[in-house]
Amino acid sequence: MAEKFDVIVVGAGMAGNAAAYTLAQAGLNVLQIERGETPGSKNVQGAILYADALEKIIPDFRDDAPLERHLIEQRVWILDDESYVGSNYRSEEFNREPYNRYTIIRAHFDQWFNKKARDAGALVLCETTVTNLLLDGKRVIGVATDRKGGEIYADCVILADGVNSLLAKKAGFHDEIKPRDVALAVKEIHFLPQETIESRFNIGEEEGVVIEMAGKITAGMMGTAFLYTNKESITLGIGCMLSDFKEQQVTPYQLLEKMKDHPAIRPLLAGSEMKEYAAHLIPEGGYHAMPQVYGDGWMIAGDAGMFVNGLHREGSNLAMTTGKLAAETLIELKEQGKAWNARSLARYQAKLDDSFVMKDLRKYRQAPAIFEKNPHFFTTYPELLNRAAHTLVKVDGVDKKSKERSIKSAFVEARSRLGLLGDAFKMWRAFQSR
Amino acid sequence: MHSVVCIKQVPDSAQIRVHPVTNTIMRQGVPAIINPYDLFALEEALRLKDRFGGTVTVITMGPPQAEVALRKCLSFGADHAILVSDRAFAGADTLATSFALSAAIGKVREDQPVDLIFTGKQTIDGDTAQVGPGIAKRLDYQLLTYVSKIVDIDFGKKEITVERRAEGGVQLLKTAVPCLITMLEGTNEMRFGDMADMFRAARYPLKVWDRVAAGIEDVAKIGLKGSPTVVGKVFAPKPRSQRAEMIEVHDNDPQDLVVTLLAKVFTRHPKIEAEIIKCAS
């Protein structure tokens, strides 16, 4: 006889775990299905955990979650081929509990998160792929899986199956994702002894550093790079829009190799041993690329719904929050004795609109298009900035006024006066549009 | 027919690293898997169940985390799972482990006779291949190691016929049941369990036996106390000081490659070059 649940959650990433945990905690009968061998085995992220989103789901997560280091310093580098202009922000305030951001390793973190959902009462099946949604007319009534006798029924299915949500595509909830709406990111984890990391980055036990990078390392493509300190390893990676990779005929690993060889990065990795290589798509299409995220008996949460703020590199917190809001919508409706249909589930969209999730995505809705059409933000400006810094810092008998003049003319020469003005406006629009 | 399959949760040896200073294995963060050889044992037991009916019980001695491994076995189709877990078992070598496991299997036999005991041919972390034979000896079961195929079981005569891989060929062996079989790798392929087994595994109330439940009274025979093995010294093989040299091949001309290669060999070993020239002339 086929099994029947209140809710089936597809996927055990941030969104899926947040949803399954919240639902199970409220006493709903939840089944969570994950295709990976264990929760987290297929999940890839930088990874930085933003405490706030998790705190709202599991307030005391710090007691037992596998956290690597809390971040006390943020470095931002604009790179040229041989140099970088950077800024640092480091504060003792970040060293006071409760900490705000942590580096994590998803393979460990997701297992912990999923265990919380299981302890709350969710039933979890791994190594099982949901192949299709079962439909009754337009209404989703369950899922089909790749296992024999694998049809399972539910009153609602939450799709938290990640960036390339084949299920939503198959069911016709959205089109195939477009190369210009996704970034392809690659990353490596390099082992280094704890003491080496702490002396190399000027940090104490459990303290961490983030380096965010942009500029010529992405070879003119729209993208960024990062380097994070874990307890006994360093994570570094780089990502650009998939359409750019396609156009430029550059492979992601070539970019990563070049990045590791940058004179400012090479010494940070010296003597390390590569432990892990991973690649993943990141849905960065933003507001305009978002699909419909709810319907008759179904909802979409996390990457599957394009809930990523590419500009601020936030994704997992949006995933957790959307998973939680999806769950809360169902819980509220059930308490009020209302059915879960397209009309009632519109409350999920209202909750999203009311949260930072949609507010931020709407604010930056112009950003993807602006950066896409203006690759010089990733090449010309980094070079100009680095050359300007070099001119100013180098002591060579040239008077300061002449130096300033030469910097100015370099900018004008590269972009023209009108161009500079236009770029400034575009930058402002990318960040300030509302 | 009742089969007991002994499994072990081991660190995935493809991912372990050796600590550069202490030379001990760094298990932290390394995923735990079911010893791959044990999966051949489990699948063979499941196949016998398919052929002749009966039940399959999986048993492991290990920390509480080993529950994951047992549930996985249940999802493949095993009927029962027992976790033998007690702090007193910590530090056990193969002698103490086979003692504890045979005691636990003894307890299983009180409920239902055990016709066959399966183990993998060895574990990938210890590589001793001693625990299986140790259990057979203690329970006074016939022992068949490195079995590659179970040919037949004659329930009337209580006999089993198997193929055993041996040096230079395959032996066809017949012995009395009950017996213990250690399965060779590559002999079968683990099935993909159906949905009903997945649900059963996820909901199965796992039996956890401590020392007393496993029927062990003498604490001197288990754990570190019951383990005469002493690790005298641990060392890692020294990495070669000379790194391998990569030779780039620019086109598909093998002759070029051979010439380049020979030139490199001859520069390093002028003696060889001299000898070849001498032979040729």
Image (spheres, rainbow, N blue to C red):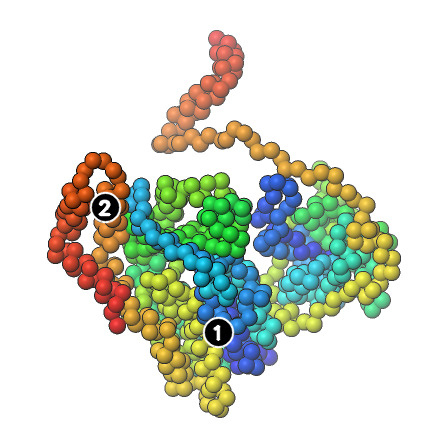
> Regarding mark 1 in the picture, which secondary structure is present there?
loop
Distance Cα–Cα, label 2 vs label 1:
45 Å
Read off the residue under disc 2.
A388
Q: Dividing the image into 4 quarters, which one contains the C terminus of chain A? A: bottom left
The amino acid pointed to by label 1 is Lys
Read off the residue under disc 1.
A56
- The subunit carrying tag 2 is A
Nearer the observer, B186 or A391 = A391
Is there any visible trace of residue B155 in the rendered image?
no
Q: Which residue occupies 74% across, 66% down?
A: B208
Q: Are marks 2 and 1 in contact (CB under 8 Å)?
A: no
Position of residue B117 in the picture relative to residue A119 (left or right): right
Task: Residue A232: give x, y in percent of width and height.
Answer: 53, 50
Which of discs 2 and 1 lies nearer the camera? The answer is: 2
Q: Which residue occupies 49% across, 31% down?
A: B244
How many numbered discs, if any?
Answer: 2
> Regarding mark 2 in the picture, which secondary structure is present there?
helix
